[in-house]
Image (cartoon, rainbow, N blue to C red):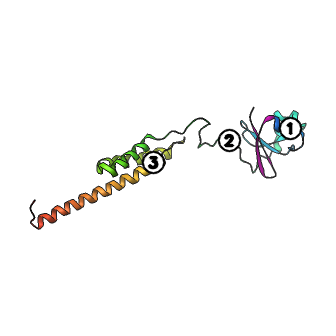
Amino acid sequence: MSDWYYGKENTQHGPVSDLEIRNLISTGEITEKTVIWREGMTDWLPLNEVQELQASSGVTPADPVAQNTDTPYVSPKTDSARPPHGMSIPTDGLATASLVCGILSVTLCGLFAGIPAVICGHKSLAKINSSPTPIQGKGMAIAGLVTGYLSLVISLLFIVFFVIGLGTAGASGAEF
């Protein structure tokens, strides 16, 4: 049996078991106008519109034309951005590759790992942002992009200073 939720005095209550909800109905804590919800229902409904609890409440179903499903309560459904219980959200491999290449580019390789870090980071962000299902790794992709671009700037500055140094040394007539 699923857990029930009910709304009373602009406060959402629950989860409560099937036995508990039937007890609340029999004691009058929940009335025919109290909105209730459980997994499998599309919207919150007043008690008098929930067929499976009609025997407990002793009320007759309301006129379906007069239904008012506007409630201040949020159905405690699983968030589409979160996987069902027991499952994990996959991490994009390109995000991981971008971060690894970015770290390597800053620490060791410079230009050679910086370019793949930037490419993988952009491709990963595009994949994560356009995916209809949740994918983890946005932070890793961004970190890979930052470190990749940082290493490219450092490498280019090194090359510029090296060329300027060679030109200055050659112009002053210094020998190696």
Magenta span: chief secondary structure: strand
SS assignment at label 2: loop
- Displayed quadrant of residue 158: bottom left
Residue at mark 3 to residue at mark 2: CA–CA distance: 29 Å
Start-end of magenta stretch: 1-18
Question: In this rendering, is residue 173 above or below 4?
Answer: below
Quick one: label 1 or label 2, which is nearer the N terminus? 1
Label pair 1/2, CB-CB below 8 angstroms: no
Q: The C terminus appears in which quarter of the rendering? A: bottom left
Magenta stretch contains residue 9? yes
SS assignment at label 3: helix
Q: Which mark is residue 13?
A: none
For badge 1, the amino acid type reads: Asn
Label pair 3/2, CB-CB below 8 angstroms: no
Judge depth for marks 3 and 2 and give the one in front: 3
Q: Which mark is residue 77?
A: 2
Q: The N terminus appears in which quarter of the rendering? A: top right
Q: Which residue is identified by label 3?
A: 140
SS assignment at label 1: helix
Q: In the image, what residue occupies the spot 85% across and 45% down?
A: 33
Label 1 packing within 10 angstroms: few (<14), some (14-19), many (20+):
some
**Which is nearer the eye, 59 or 6?**
6
For badge 3, the amino acid type reads: Met
Q: Which residue is identified by label 1?
A: 23
Q: In the image, what residue occupies the spot 35% across and 56% down?
A: 150
Is 124 displayed left or right of 175 in the figure? Answer: right
Can residue 151 be seen in the rendering of this structure?
yes
Label 3 packing within 10 angstroms: few (<14), some (14-19), many (20+):
many
Quick one: label 3 or label 2, which is nearer the N terminus? 2
For badge 2, the amino acid type reads: Lys
